[in-house]
Image (tube, grey):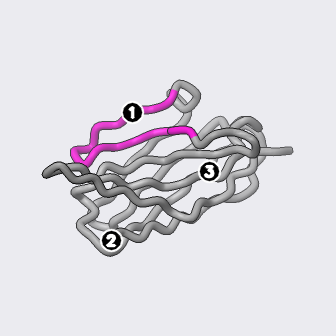
Amino acid sequence: QVQLVESGGGLVQPGGSLKVSCRASGSIFSWYDMAWYRQAPGNERELVADISARGTTKYAGSAEGRFTISRDNAKNTVYLQMNSLKPEDTAVYYCHAEWTGLSLKYEYWGQGTQVTVSS
């Protein structure tokens, strides 16, 4: 079992920056691929960025060049640094952990943290 707790959401003006964090507990964090998803009202949950257990990163087109995902295995934490924020970035941001191996797949979600971009 993995427990994920997000923090750092809030209200920010367009063009501003925000860093959200997700702390994991309950298992070996470094084994897991980690990701940030977001869901705006009326929309489906979408992938924003992910970082593999080895540190390889991928970004959605909307996040490329503005957001940076990183992880600190010593702190069991994954981060999402968001710069040049736009109103359309407003959403609940969810942390996701996934481990796949030995024909098994384990995945876990955090409870989400609200990010609102508005003047």
Query: How far is the residue under mark 1 from the one under mark 3?
Result: 19 Å
28 w.r.t. 83: above or below? below
- Amino acid type of the residue tagged 2 in the rendering: Gln
Where residue 8 appears, x then y in whole percent?
A: 60, 62
Q: Closer to us: mark 3 or mark 2?
A: 2
- Quadrant occupied by the N terminus: bottom left
> Looking at the image, is mark 3 or mark 2 earlier in the sequence?
2
Give the numbered dot on residue 1. 2
> Looking at the image, is mark 1 or mark 3 earlier in the sequence?
3
Q: Residue at horizontal 62%, vertical 60%?
A: 113
Q: Would you name the residue on which mark 3 appears? A: 18
Image: magenta residue range: 46-60
Query: How far is the residue under mark 3 from the one under mark 2?
Result: 29 Å
Q: Residue at horizontal 70%, vertical 58%?
A: 10
Q: Foreground: 75 or 41?
A: 41
> Quick check: marks 3 and 2 in contact, CB under 8 Å?
no
Q: Closer to us: mark 1 or mark 3?
A: 1
Q: Residues within 10 Å of mark 3 (few under 14, many from 20)?
A: some
